[in-house]
């Protein structure tokens, strides 16, 4: 179905993203010709974090932060335990979940929706 078939208050958007302490560290510096860029870069690896937000037009309905990456089981748990309890049956508010087609969203996550009573 097309996204235009639903009202904005029905939609909940899910996506994951990763960040670390070095995400904002510039890889290149710019200075006037003949000048040197003075910027220290640490060679240490930064710890990675994953964000799982669920957002509606009224703001976040659920959000979780994990150390490291997120696998299919963690994603499934987030949807089942954090997102679905805050959603209402269709056609109510927060009744249509929109997510991209990343690999972790596929088989295991569809099992959640197929097993809802």
Image (spheres, rainbow, N blue to C red):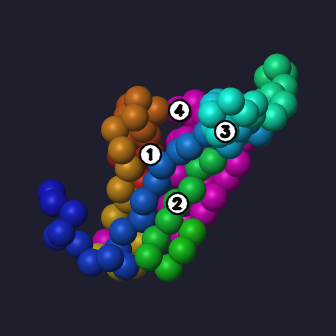
Instruction: Judge by depth and name the residue closer to the eye, 87 or 69.
Output: 69
* Residue at 18% in and 69% down: 4
Q: Which of marks 3 and 2 is nearer the N terminus?
A: 3
Magenta-drawn segment: 61-90
| N-terminal label among 3 and 1 | 3
Q: Where the N terminus falls, by quadrant?
A: bottom left
Label 4 or label 2, whichever comes before in sequence order: 2
Q: Which of marks 1 and 2 is nearer the N terminus?
A: 2
Of 92 and 26, the residue lying toward us? 26
- Which residue corresponds to mark 4? 72
Q: Residues within 10 Å of mark 4 (few under 14, many from 20)?
A: some
Is 30 in front, or is 105?
A: 30
- Residue 97, given in percent of the width and then of the height, sits at 38, 59
Mark in the foreground, 3 or 1: 3
Q: Residues within 10 Å of mark 1 (few under 14, many from 20)?
A: some
**Distance in Å between CA atoms under marks 4 and 1:** 12 Å
Q: Does 65 appear in magenta?
A: yes
According to the image, label 1 marks what residue?
112
Residue 75 location (% of width, % of height): 55, 41
Under circle 1, the secondary element is helix
Q: Is mark 4 on a helix, strand or loop?
A: helix
- Separation of marks 3 and 1 at Cα, in angstroms: 54 Å
Q: Residue 36 carries which label?
A: none
């Amino acid at each position: 179905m097309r996204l235009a078939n639903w009202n904005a208050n029905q939609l909940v958007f899910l996506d994951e993203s990763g960040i670390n302490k070095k995400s904002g560290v510039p890889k290149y510096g710019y200075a006037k010709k003949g000048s040197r860029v003075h910027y220290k870069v640490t060679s240490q690896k930064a710890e990675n974090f994953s964000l799982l937000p669920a957002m509606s037009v009224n703001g976040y309905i659920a959000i979780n932060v994990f150390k490291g990456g997120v696998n299919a089981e963690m994603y499934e748990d987030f949807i089942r335990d954090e997102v679905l309890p805050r959603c209402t049956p269709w056609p109510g508010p927060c009744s249509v979940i929109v997510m991209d087609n990343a690999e972790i969203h596929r088989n295991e996550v569809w099992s959640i929706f197929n097993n809802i009573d």
